[in-house]
Image: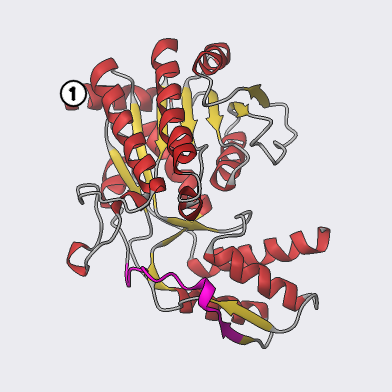
Amino acid sequence: MIGRGRDLRRFIRSWSYRIMRIFITGATGFAGSHLVEQLLEQGHRILALVHAATSHQDLPSHDLIQPVVGDLLDPEGLAGAVAAARPDVIFHLAGQAYPARSWIDPAQTIAVNTGGTANLLRAAAEYGRPRVVVVTSAEIYGPISPDDLPLTESTRPHPRHPYGVSKLAAGQLAQAYWERYGLPVVEARPFNHIGPRQAAGFVVPDFASQLAAIRLGHTEPVIRVGNLEPERDFTDVRDVARAYWRLAEQGLPGEAYLICSGQSVSIRHLLDTLIELSGVAVEVETEQLRINPVDIPCLYGSYAKIERDTGWRPQVPLRQSLADALADWEQRLLQA
C-alpha cells in the first residue's frame, strides 16, 4: 500500500499545476473561507456544498464558485452531488466544530462528523476515486502527559468528549477507504488555528471581540477571561489552509498529518499581545464560569511529517495572526 501511495504522489505532482474542479464541504467556515480564497487565486473551479439549515454565511461572489445543494446526512443526494460536480479533488471541512457543544447533542455530533464523513467517502469512491483531504482534529488525543510531547501522528489517541470520538472515527474511516477501495484520501489533523473570520467561542476571538468593543467605546474597559495559564499550539488559519492544499498535492494516501506550529504559547501571552496591539488600557477580570477545570497545562505538536512529505511549514508570525484577528473584529463591530 505504501508503494501505491508513493506512485500516486508522483502522479499528483504531475497535475498539481493544472486548473482543477474542487469540491469543498465547509467552504463558508473559518478555514474553508481561507482555503477558497487561495484556490481562487490559483484559478481553480470550486464547487461548494451548501445546506440551507447549516450554511449561515454567503459564498464569495465569483465566476469560479458554484454552490452545490446537498446534505452530508443524505447519502444518495450527496453521491449525486459529487457525481454531478465531477471533482478532481475533494476537501472535507464541514462538521460540528465545538467540543463543548458535543456534550449537548453527542448523537448529532457523531452523526455529522462521522456519518457525514462516511457518506462523503462512499460518494467519492463511487464517483471515481478523486483525491480527498479529510479534516479531523488534534482533539482526538485527549489528556496528554508532558512525557508525550510533542504530539506526533503516532501518539495514541484517547479522546475525552464526543467531538474527539467523532473525529477519531472519521480519520479511521479515511484510512479504511484507502485500504479497501484505493481511495486516495489523506487525513489532516489541525491544532488550534487563529486569524481573521473566526467565530466567537474560541479564545482568540473571545479576547479580540472584547478588546475591539472597548477600543470603539462600545463597552467598559474590562476584559473577562478564564484560566490564562494553559499553553497551546496555535497556527495561523492561512497557513492551515495552505497545508490542506499541500496535502492534496503531495500527502501520502492513507496517512494522517498534524498541522501545527511546533511550539506552545500561553493563553496569557495571547491576551497580553492582543492588549498591546489594541492600544487600550484594560482591567482583566477572571470569571469562574470561563475556567475549564480539566485544562491540560501544556499541549503542542510536531509538524515534522508534513514538512518531510510536502515541504509545508508555518509562515505567518503569531503577532500578525493576532493583529489580523483584532482588526477583523473591529471591522465586524463597525459594520454591525
Q: Is residue 26 visible?
A: yes
- Of 1 and 103, the residue lying toward us: 103
Q: Would you place residue 91 above or below residue 122 in this image? A: below
Q: Which residue is denoted by mark 1 in the rendering?
A: 1
Q: Is residue 312 visible?
A: no
Q: Is residue 162 magenta?
A: no
In the rendering, at what x and y percent does residue 143 appear?
A: 28, 61
**Magenta residue span:** 284-298
Quarter of the image for residue 62 reads top right
Quarter of the image for residue 185 reads top left
Left/right of residue 34 with respect to residue 173 in the rendered view: right
In the rendering, at what x and y percent does residue 130 appear?
A: 42, 19
Left/right of residue 223 with respect to residue 100 in the rendered view: right
Q: Would you place residue 202 above or below residue 72 in this image? A: below
**Disc 1, SS:** loop
Q: Would you place residue 330 above or below residue 156 in this image? A: below
Picture quarter with the C terminus: bottom right
Quarter of the image for residue 232 reads bottom left
Label 1: how many residues lie within 10 Å, few (<14), some (14-19) or many (20+)?
A: few
Residue found at x 58% / y 75%: 274
- Of 277 and 335, the residue lying toward us: 335
Tell me which amino acid carries mark 1.
Met
In the rendering, at what x and y percent does residue 246 appear?
A: 41, 39
